[in-house]
Image (spheres, rainbow, N blue to C red):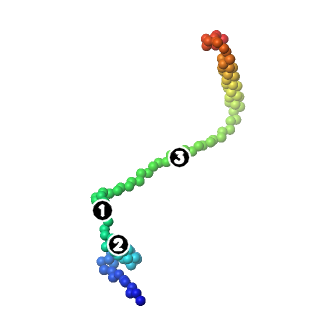
Amino acid sequence: MKKKNTLILDDEFIKYCQLNNIENIDKLAKETFSRGFTILKYGETPKMGVGTKEIIKEIPVEKIVEKEVIKEVMITDTEEINKLIEENKKLKEDLNKITTSLTKAKYMKNSDMGSLYDE
């Protein structure tokens, strides 16, 4: 039968656990022993960059959220509706005049631009 090894804890270690409100003293003792034994077995790792510290800062970033708002408005003013209809008709007539002028200019052969303004 194999003999079970146990850790005998020093009073100073127990007082440290009590001061720091550590409830599972045996678990901490085993972890501490393991770390110490690993250092003893493999040696300490060399320290790189003695005296340097790495500082990581979190900077809050505001996020702009754009929202599209669609608002439906009922137009009950018939005067305004009639005015807009008339404006629409006038704009369509102007567009037709411009279109026909451009069509005439396109099909004119051997003419100079001065003759277009004589009309």
Q: Amino acid at mark 2?
A: Thr
At which x and y percent is residue 73? Answer: 66, 39
- Report which residue position mark 2 lands on: 38
Query: Which residue occupies the extreme bottom position in the image?
Result: 1
Q: Is residue 48 left or right of residue 79?
A: left
Q: Is residue 72 above or below residue 103?
A: below
Instruction: Answer with the quarter of the image where residue 4 lies.
Output: bottom left
Q: Is residue 107 above or below residue 41?
A: above
Mark 3 vs mark 1: give the one in front. Answer: 1
Q: Amino acid at mark 1?
A: Lys
At which x and y percent is residue 82? Answer: 71, 28
At which x and y percent is residue 7? Answer: 35, 81
Mark 2 vs mark 3: give the one in front. Answer: 2
Dot 3 falls on a residue whose secondary structure is: loop
Residue 79 visible in the shown view: no
At which x and y percent is residue 47? Answer: 30, 62
Q: Earlier in the sequence, mark 3 or mark 1?
A: 1
Task: Check contact, mark 3 vs mark 1: CB within 8 A.
Answer: no
> What is the spatial separation of the Cα atoms under label 1 and label 2, in whole angstroms?
17 Å
Q: Is residue 113 above or below residue 66?
A: above
> What is the spatial separation of the Cα atoms under label 3 and label 1, in whole angstroms?
47 Å
- Report which residue position mark 1 lands on: 47
Residue 118 visible in the shown view: yes
- Report which residue position mark 3 lands on: 65
